[in-house]
Image: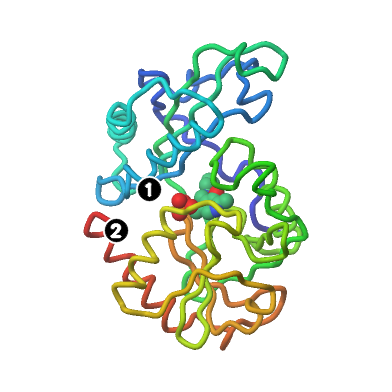
Amino acid sequence: MNFDQPNQYAPNPNLKIWMNGKIVPVAEATISIFDHCILYGDGVFEGIRSYGGKVFRLDAHLRRLEDSARAIRLTIPMTREELATAVYDAMKANKIVDGYIRLVVTRGVGTLGLSPNRTACPSVFIIADQIALYPQELYEQGMAVISSSVIRNHPNALSARIKSCNYINNILAKIEALDAGVYEAIMYNHLGYVAECTGDNIFLVRNGVVQTPPITAGILEGVTRDAVIELVAKRKIPFREMELTRHDLYVADECFLTGTAAEVIPVTQIDGRPIGTGKPGPIVRQLMADFRELVKHGG
Ligand code: PXG
């Protein structure tokens, strides 16, 4: 396989990181090996984009970060306003206009035991850089994905609504995708219904109706998902949040994924089967154009 080779994406050594209130060179942005985020994946994060110097839906991202933190009983040592300022400071330090921002809050340094009560001082860091998730031609031709055998976390084990630093569930499915020679995998929930992909939400089009699994399918409430649902409403395209099965995927006219990093990308093959005509359909092409316009005009 000739994609996703190691070291292809080594960080830019000139990167400046916002770390606990200071802008530091990337080499000095370090985390203790005793941080519970390292030991247990005990932390929360957001992946955010900026377009033309403006952060896309920053408030929605920060609210979701706060909800994730609250769900794991982690107190973020900053207000929403301070976080927003820090995001822009990280962008400025790296002269980012169109870019990708990773905001992470770790539980902090603790003992070699699970108890979060024995930790002190959560760390907050912000990476402002670039991201290119999928090759450009896939946006034009559509991409192939597979159904993963790894089910999405049971919501009563670890809710998918928490954007935690423990992404092993998703990474296991991602490995399956890469082994199959594709970039994404569709994850089903514990009931057998379609949930989402490893880092993207999923939509179908069938007989002119845009369909997507509801939040109760055990998925992340994507910021891009919400934006696309608004675009669908603006176009007056019929829309349904509904339970979807593998059968629905196979008989769909169109399929597409949404995510901060991916934006809106057509899916034209699932498990080796062509979806619809096997080419990106009219509705996804319209929504991709609408999404471009939306981000150009500030979200
Ligand atoms: N579902 C999951 C599980 C995600 O992680 C989305 C949906 C889309 O949500 P937003 O809010 O971004 O529209 C995500 C977010 C990656 C990567 O490298 C992807 C995400 C986060 C971090 C890394 O693919 N996706």
Q: Position of residue 229 (x, y in %)?
A: 39, 66
Please tell me whether residue 46 is drawn above or below residue 2 in the rendered image. Answer: above
Residue 38 percent across, percent down from the top left: 64, 25
User: Would residue 298 appear left or right of 10 to someone viewing this image?
Assistant: left
Q: Tell me where residue 91 sits by quadrant.
A: top left
Which of the marked residues, 2 or 1, is nearer the chain's N terminus?
1
Give the image quarter of residue 242: bottom right
Q: Could you tell me the amino acid type at mark 2?
A: Val
For the residue pair 47 and 191, the one nearer the viewer reads as 191
Asked whether disc 2 touches disc 1, contact meaning CB atoms under 8 Å apart, the reply is yes
Q: Which residue is mark 2?
A: 295
Q: Is residue 263 left or right of residue 185?
A: left
Mark 1 C-beta closer than 8 Å to ligand 1: no
In the rendered image, is residue 127 in sight?
A: yes
Question: Dot 1: what SS?
Answer: strand
Q: Which mark is residue 49?
A: 1
Q: Is residue 112 left or right of residue 296?
A: right
**In this figure, what is the number of numbered marks?**
2
Q: Is residue 152 above or below residue 208?
A: above
